[in-house]
Image: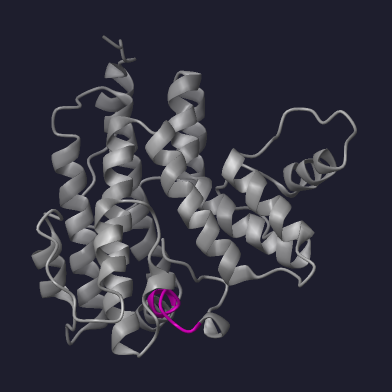
């Protein structure tokens, strides 16, 4: 039996979060720092897994331009990417800095004689991330990540089909639902009876209000998090669920500051546009 660390005082002191209020009590960066200071190192490693998605963006930017966006909440800096690049040519290379899948994709991109393919790199990073979480994540993080990939894959499948795009390239991860969607690429989609939320997600598509539709998806995420951590009173999974809900609130708070629905539409559209039309906020995750 695995003995898990308990964080009674820390969790008891966290303010309650409400999807309807959508109020942030602290920035994501400050909360991440707080977690680093209060969690056991093994548990903080799980927090870092969550923020690897931010590292995907900065790594893609580095491979494309040699620079990264200042600030951010990722785990790695431009110095880390430069050092990892030097490791590739070392006679006796030290231990890699980045996770294995990021190392592999970085090396492939640097060796590609045709130049950096941002869309292809983003797709490979998403694939690598899914398997990295399934192999290394906590029980909550594994289950939640699989749900997110399943939902995003289903939405990408639907939207790509509506715009006459090939659907298979937009499907990421190795879940059974991803396999189900790949089997139906290019033809009418049949229900996946193994994906519990298939009908609910399908019922949200095509809403008159774009922002309203997105809020339904995020509310579903919120409720699923609540269900997943219901019995996790003081464990790292309770904290990871809280962090994921903070990220949902942060998304809507940021959108209010950056032109609301138009900004949201651009972000979501980037997940299924033709590859050459994607912008820096693109991706399937």
In the rendered image, the residue lying farthest to the front is: 183
Colour scheme in use: one colour
**Place of residue 53 in the rendered image (x, y in percent of width and height, measured from the top left):** 50, 52
From the top left corner, tell me how far across and down residue 225 is, in percent. 21, 44
Residue 21 located left or right of residue 74 = left
In the rendered structure, the answer to whether residue 73 lies left or right of residue 169 reads: right
In the picture, measured across the screen, residue 191 lies left or right of residue 285, that is left
Query: Measured from the top left, where is residue 236 in percent x and y?
Result: 33, 26
Left or right: 244 as drawn, with respect to 54: left
From this view, report whether residue 11 is shown above or below residue 86.
above
Name the residue nearer the viewer: 119 or 62: 119
Question: Relative to 201, is 177 above or below?
Answer: above
User: Which residue is more in the foreground, 142 or 36?
Assistant: 142
The residue lying at 40 percent from left, 80 percent from top is 269
Find out whether residue 269 is within the magenta segment: yes
| Residue 22 in sight here | no
The stretch in magenta equals: 267-274
Q: Is residue 285 visible?
A: yes
At 37% from the left and 81% from the top, the residue drawn is: 265
Q: How would you classify the magenta stretch by its main secondary structure?
A: loop
> Which residue is at 50% across, 41% downward?
30
């Amino acid at each position: 039996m695995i003995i898990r660390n308990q964080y009674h005082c820390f969790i008891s002191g966290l303010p309650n979060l409400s999807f309807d209020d959508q109020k942030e009590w602290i920035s994501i960066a400050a909360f991440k720092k707080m977690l680093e200071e209060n969690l056991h190192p093994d548990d903080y490693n799980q927090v870092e897994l969550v923020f690897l998605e931010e590292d995907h963006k900065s790594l893609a930017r580095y491979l494309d331009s040699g620079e990264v966006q200042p600030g951010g909440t990722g785990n790695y800096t431009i110095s880390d990417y430069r050092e990892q690049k030097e490791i590739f040519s070392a006679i006796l290379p030290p231990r890699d800095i980045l996770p294995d899948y990021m190392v592999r994709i970085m090396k492939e991109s640097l060796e590609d004689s045709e130049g950096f393919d941002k869309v292809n790199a983003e797709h490979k990073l998403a694939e690598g991330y899914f398997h990295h979480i399934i192999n290394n994540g906590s029980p909550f993080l594994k289950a939640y990540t699989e749900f997110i990939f399943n939902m995003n894959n289903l939405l990408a499948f639907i939207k790509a089909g509506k715009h006459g795009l090939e659907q298979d390239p937009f499907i990421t991860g190795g879940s059974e639902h991803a396999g189900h969607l790949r089997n139906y690429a290019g033809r009418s989609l049949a229900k996946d009876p193994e994906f519990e939320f298939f009908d609910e997600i399908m019922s949200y598509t095509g809403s008159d209000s774009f922002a309203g539709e997105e809020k339904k998806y995020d509310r579903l995420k919120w409720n699923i998090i609540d269900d997943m951590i219901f019995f996790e009173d003081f464990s790292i999974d309770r904290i990871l669920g809280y962090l994921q809900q903070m990220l949902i609130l942060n998304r809507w708070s940021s959108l209010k500051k950056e032109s609301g629905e138009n900004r949201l539409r651009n972000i979501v559209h980037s997940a299924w546009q033709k590859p050459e039309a994607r912008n820096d906020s693109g991706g399937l995750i």
